[in-house]
């Protein structure tokens, strides 16, 4: 049986040159499906990577009942109570607890000039001891007390007017861009940072903050900190790791992107299946005499059917290779942004075309090819030998 399958498959593949047009249609239909499949899932993968880029050595404290920083709020007495908790790291006696406020600025996108909502984070000097992975890569840090900002690397790439030396206008207020920072490709790189004490009166925040970032004495001390803050009668808070918070903020967006992507891929897959069915029916019709002759010589119908499926899968694999290569070359690492509905602000991220996604694209192509080749394979296996031989 194996010898028969190999012999008939070799004959099928040799005859592809005679029907190159229909075979190319099937290949490029599959390639189109794989490109869309990988492209959409690479968006979700990029958002997932962004969510996982948070620092696990940092804890984030929000007001109880808040699921985002924008809906949270603390006064300075609450910040001081958080700073007194056990498991908070210290530097020369200073508690590494960073109170931070968050407001939204309207900044134009580079690609089309449309204004997007970008987070402006107000911090105190202690923030740069708490966020230990953050580093200035161009220009300098802002000077406390001045209307100066530093911008994340992703924000600078994606939004217009954020070059060092430029000025951002927010109502009557002007912010001078004096530096660019990186933070290990976390969500912070899509933000703009300034002095919290300057931002508070500008945005009518008095002496309030949205969240407190806390550096732990050790990663294993998170539960100690959480228990202490949750049982402190002065506080009503929610405590989570920074990495967990970022992951949670991107989870709904990931689900939405995956859902929309699978619907679009499903519609394209339908067309690809019909193209594969048409191609394989044409292949069977073009080889009616050869198949009948082989059957008359004793070749089993199963061998013929398997050969048709093998051809369909090989065409699908070629399409998957083309589609995967196109997706990887054009999209991997591509920087863009989208609206995070939970934060009501833009989030900048990179497409991530991973080996797992490419394998999933190949699997998708193989499944579609098998579906598209099933009916033509069945027809080839049941081809009436006597009627076919009359055409000789």
Image (cartoon, rainbow, N blue to C red):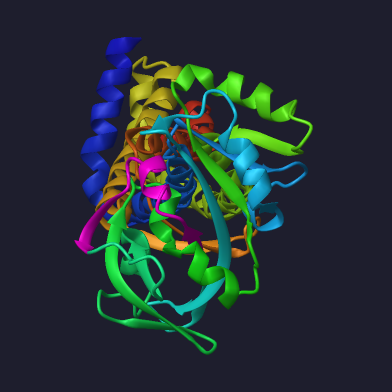
Task: Name the residue rendered at 54%, 54% in the picture.
Answer: 100
Task: Name the residue rendered at 41%, 70% in the picture.
Answer: 145
- Above or below 331: residue 95: above
Image check: 216 left or right of 23?
Answer: right
Tell which residue pokes out farthest to the front in this image: 93
* Figure quadrant of residue 108: bottom left
* Figure quadrant of residue 310: top left
Residue 336: image x %, image y %? Answer: 40, 63
Q: Please check the rendered image and state whether residue 129 is part of the magenta-colored stretch, yes or no.
A: yes
Image quarter hosting the N terminus: top left
Residue 274: image x %, image y %? Answer: 53, 51
Region in magenta? 119-139
Image check: 92 left or right of 251?
Answer: left
Q: Please check the rendered image and state whether residue 263 is part of the magenta-colored stretch, yes or no.
A: no
Task: Name the residue rendered at 62%, 58% in the picture.
Answer: 343
Q: Is residue 185 visible?
A: yes
Residue 367: image x %, image y %? Answer: 49, 34
Which residue is at the front of the view, 349 or 187? 187
Tell which residue pokes out farthest to the top in this image: 1
Which residue is at the front of the view, 4 or 151? 151
Residue 158: image x %, image y %? Answer: 36, 68
Q: How many marks?
A: 0
- Above or below 126: residue 355: above
């Amino acid at each position: 049986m194996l010898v028969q399958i190999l012999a008939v498959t070799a004959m099928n593949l040799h005859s592809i040159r005679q029907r190159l047009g229909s075979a190319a249609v099937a290949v490029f239909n599959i390639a189109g499906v794989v490109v869309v499949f990988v492209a959409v899932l690479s968006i979700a993968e990029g958002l997932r990577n962004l969510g996982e880029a948070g620092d696990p050595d940092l804890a984030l404290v929000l007001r109880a009942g808040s699921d985002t920083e924008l809906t949270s709020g603390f006064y300075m007495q609450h910040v001081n109570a958080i700073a007194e908790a056990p498991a908070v790291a210290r530097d020369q006696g200073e508690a590494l607890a960073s109170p931070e406020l968050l407001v939204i600025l309207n900044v134009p996108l580079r690609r089309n000039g449309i204004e997007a909502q970008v987070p402006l984070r107000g911090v105190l000097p202690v923030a740069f001891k708490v966020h230990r992975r953050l580093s200035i890569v161009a220009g300098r840090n802002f000077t406390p007390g001045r209307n100066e900002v530093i911008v994340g690397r992703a924000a600078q790439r994606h939004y217009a007017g954020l070059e060092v030396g430029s000025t951002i206008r927010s109502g009557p207020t002007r912010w001078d861009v004096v530096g660019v920072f990186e933070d290990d490709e976390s969500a912070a790189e899509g933000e703009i940072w300034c002095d919290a004490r300057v931002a508070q009166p500008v945005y009518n925040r008095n002496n309030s903050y949205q969240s407190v970032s806390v550096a732990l004495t050790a990663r294993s001390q998170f539960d100690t900190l959480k228990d202490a803050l949750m049982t402190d009668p002065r506080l009503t808070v929610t405590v989570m790791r920074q990495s967990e918070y970022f992951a949670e903020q991107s989870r709904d967006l990931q689900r939405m992107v995956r859902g929309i992507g699978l619907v679009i891929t499903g519609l394209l897959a339908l067309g690809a299946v019909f193209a594969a069915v048409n191609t394989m029916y044409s292949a069977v019709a073009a080889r009616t005499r050869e198949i009948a002759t082989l059957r008359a010589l004793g070749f089993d119908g199963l061998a013929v059917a398997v050969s048709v499926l093998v051809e369909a899968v090989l065409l699908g694999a070629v399409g998957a290779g083309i589609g995967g290569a196109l997706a990887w070359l054009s999209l991997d690492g591509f920087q863009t942004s989208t609206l995070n509905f939970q934060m009501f602000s833009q989030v900048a991220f990179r497409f991530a075309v991973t080996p797992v996604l490419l394998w999933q694209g190949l699997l998708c192509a193989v499944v579609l090819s098998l579906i598209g080749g099933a009916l033509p394979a069945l027809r080839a296996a049941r081809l009436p030998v006597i009627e076919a031989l009359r055409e000789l």
